[in-house]
Amino acid sequence: MCPGRRCWGLGSLLLLLLLLGQNLGFLLEIPQDAVTGTVGQSVLLPVSYRCNSTPCFPLSIRWIFGHTSQVIIACTVHNCSLDDGGAPKNCSTTCFPHPAHWGRVVLFPENASLLLRDLWLSDSGVYTVSLQHQRQSRNITLTVLEQPVPTDPTSKGRNLGFLLEIPQDAVTGTVGQSVLLPVSYRCNSTPCFPVAIQWLFSHPIERIIACTVQNCSLGDGGAPKNCSTNCYSYRTHWGRVELFPENASLLLRDLRLSDSGVYTVSFLQNQRQIRHITLTVLEQPVPTEPTREGTSQPAGRIATRIPCCILRGCYCFILLLLQLLFHLCWLRGSRGEACGCCWGEGSQRAGAARAGAQ
C-alpha cells in the first residue's frame, strides 16, 4: 500500500512546475532604482519587460505609491507584438489613473515606465510597479527637490530674470524604451512669453521638434504652468517625441541605437540660451541563468532557436504525464495495492519474493 503522503511529492512537483511556468521567459528590469526630480518638472520612472517563450498578454500593470499604498494608475496591456528580443511594441492599453493623479501620470505600455508630471515635494517616496499576472514587482525611489534659487547675473547679462538649467547632462536609455531629457526654466522679473524652444540632434545636426510656448502663468518661484503651446515635430521623429512646455523637457520614445549622441535645447528670441545633454542608448540586456558549472548563459537562447509552440507543447505533455502518474498512484493506494510510485517499497517486496522462491 502506498500512503498518500508518499505520493504527495508528485502533486507538489506538479504545483511547482505550474508556478515556475507562469514566469517562464519573462524578464522585468529597472535601469535605475533611484531617480531625482525637481518641483514643477517631469520625471520618468524607467522600467522594461520582455516576454520570450510564453504568452503574457493581456498583462495587468499597477503603479503604487509606497508611502500611502495608493494605486496611482492601473493598466491592462493587450494585443502587443514582440520583436526578436521579446520586447513589446504596438500595444493597445486601457488605463485608469487615480483621481489624485489625473493629468499628471502617463504609463507607456511597451515598457511599463511611468511619467510623472508637475512634481510636488510630497511625491517623494518609494514607487512600486507590479505586474500582477506574472507576480513580479520592482521598486524605484523618487526624491523631489525644491526649485534651485537663481543667482542674479551681472549687468552684462541680457537675460535678467531668466534661468535655464538641466539636472543631468548625461542620460542613459535602452533600445525600445522611452527616456526623458530633463530641463527646467524660470522667468522671475521679465516677461518671457511667447518663447520659442527648439531641440536639435547634433549627430548629424538635425531639428527634432520646435515649439512656441505662450500664455503661461508663473508660480511663486517663477516656474511656468498652465501653458498653451504650438509644436511641430520633424519627419525623422514623428510620433516619437513630446515636449513639455512647463519645463522644456523632451520625451523620446521607442529608442534606437542611432539615437545616441548630443541633444541641444535652444531658447530663441529674447533669451537665446542653449544647453546640451548627451544620450547613450544601450542594447536590450540579455537575461542570464546559471548553468550546472556555475557559469551563466543567455536564457533566451533556447527560446530563439526552438519555436515557442514546441516548448509549450513539451511543457504541457510533461505536466499531463505527471498528473496521470499522480492519479494512478492515488487510485492504487486507495485500493490497498502496491503503488507504482513508491519504487523503493516495490523493489523491497520484489526482492523478498525472489528470496522466498529460492
Image: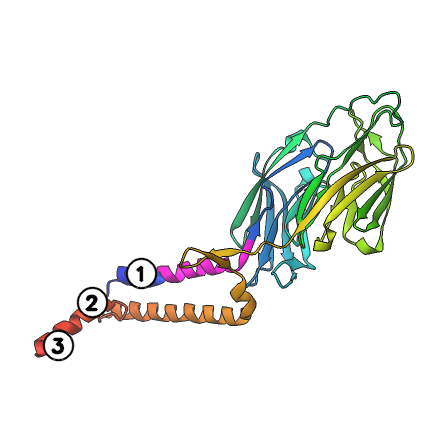
Q: Are marks 2 and 1 in contact (CB under 8 Å)?
A: no
Name the residue located 79 percent from the left edge and 30 percent from the top edge.
223
Camera-side mark, 2 or 1: 2
Q: Residues within 10 Å of mark 1 (few under 14, many from 20)?
A: some
Residue 26's disc number: none
Q: Which residue is mark 2?
A: 345
> Tell me, what colour scheme is on the image?
rainbow
Where residue 115 appears, as percent x and y from the top left, is 69, 43
Name the residue located 60 percent from the left edge and 50 percent from the top edge.
61
Which residue is at the front of the view, 270 or 190? 270
Q: Secondary structure at mark 3?
A: helix
Give the image quarter of residue 171: top right
Q: Is residue 116 visible?
A: no
Q: Which residue is mark 1?
A: 8
Q: Secondary structure at mark 1?
A: helix
Residue furthest right as drawn: 269
Split into 4 quadrants, where in the image is the C terminus? bottom left
Question: What's the amino acid at mark 3?
Answer: Arg
Instruction: From the viewer's perspective, tell me whether residue 210 is left or right of residue 86.
Output: right
Q: Is residue 128 visible?
A: yes
Highlighted range, magenta = 12-27
Question: What's the amino acid at mark 1?
Answer: Trp
Disc 2 to disc 3, how far (Cα)?
15 Å
Compare marks 2 and 3 and give the one earlier in the sequence: 2
Residue 354's disc number: 3
Disc 2 to disc 1, how far (Cα)?
16 Å
Instruction: From the viewer's perspective, tell me whether residue 260 is left or right of residue 350.
Output: right
